[in-house]
Amino acid sequence: MAYLTYFVLILNGMTFYSTFRIMQMMMRFDGRLGFPGGFVDARDSTLEEGLNRELLEELGPVFNTLKVTEKDYRSSQVRELPQKGVTHFYTKELTLEELEAIEREGVCAKDHGLEVMGLVRVPLYTLRDGFGGLPAFLSNNFIGNSKSQLLYGLRTLRLLREDQIQDAMWASQNT
C-alpha cells in the first residue's frame, strides 16, 4: 500500500480594509491541478518527514526552515484506484511574507519545470456572471482526490460558507 501526503498552504490575514484568505495549489506536469506532496518512502521515518522532503523538492528552499508537523494534519483517505493507497492531508497557516517567499522561491525548486509547472492561488470568490472565479476553477482537471480535498479544506477551515461552496459546485457543473 502506498502512502501519499498532500499539503495545502493557507493564509489568513488582514489588511486595513478587509480580511483576506489565500489557498494555494499547483499545476502539475500532466496539466492537472493538485496539492504539493508525494510518496513517503523507506528513507522517511515519519509521514511529516516524507512530506517535508517532497515540499523541499517541489516548492523550494523556503522549506528548509518552514516545516510541516503533526499539528498540521487534517485527514486521511483510503483510495483503491489507480493503485491502493492512503492519502494524508495537511494544512499550514502562513504569514503573507511566508506565502510570498514560497511563490518567489518556487522557481528555484528541484522539481520546478519537471513535476511542478507553477503555483496557483485558488479563487475564493464567484464573479457576477455566476461562473468566473471558483466555479470556473472547479471545472479544471484535478489529480486523484485533490478536488475533494480542496472542498474539504474550504469547509473545515471555514474559508467559505457552505452555501458559497454549493453554489460554486453547481455552477461548475451546469454553466
Image (spheres, helix red, strand yellow):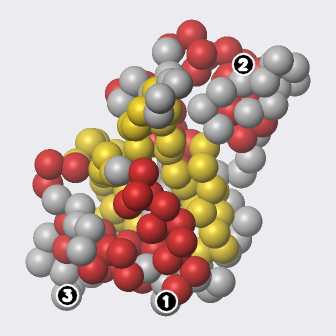
Marks counted in the figure total 3
Mark toward the viewer: 2 or 1: 1
Note whether 19 is above or below 149 in the view shown: above
Report if residue 5 is visible in the image. yes
Label of residue 25 in the image: none
Mark seen at residue 170: 2
Which dot marks residue 43? Answer: 3
Q: Tell which circle, 2 or 1, labels the residue nearer the N-terminal end.
A: 1
Give the quadrant of residue 116: bottom right
Instruction: First in sequence, mark 3 or 1: give its number.
Output: 3
User: In which quadrant will I find the C terminus?
Assistant: top right
- Quadrant in the rendering for residue 168: top right
Residue shown at the point (16%, 59%) measured from the top left: 69
145 or 171: nearer the viewer: 171
- Type of amino acid under label 1: Lys
> Mark 1 and mark 3 in contact (Cβ < 8 Å)?
no
Crowdedness near tag 3: few (<14), some (14–19) or many (≥20) residues, C-alpha within 10 Å:
few
Q: Amino acid at mark 3?
A: Arg
- Circles 2 and 3: CB distance less than 8 Å? no
Rendered position, 133 above or below 56: above
Depicted 36 relative to depicted 23: above or below: below
Residue 38 x, y percent position in the rendering: 41, 70
Determine which residue is flagged by label 1.
Answer: 110
- 29 relative to 151 in the view: left or right: right
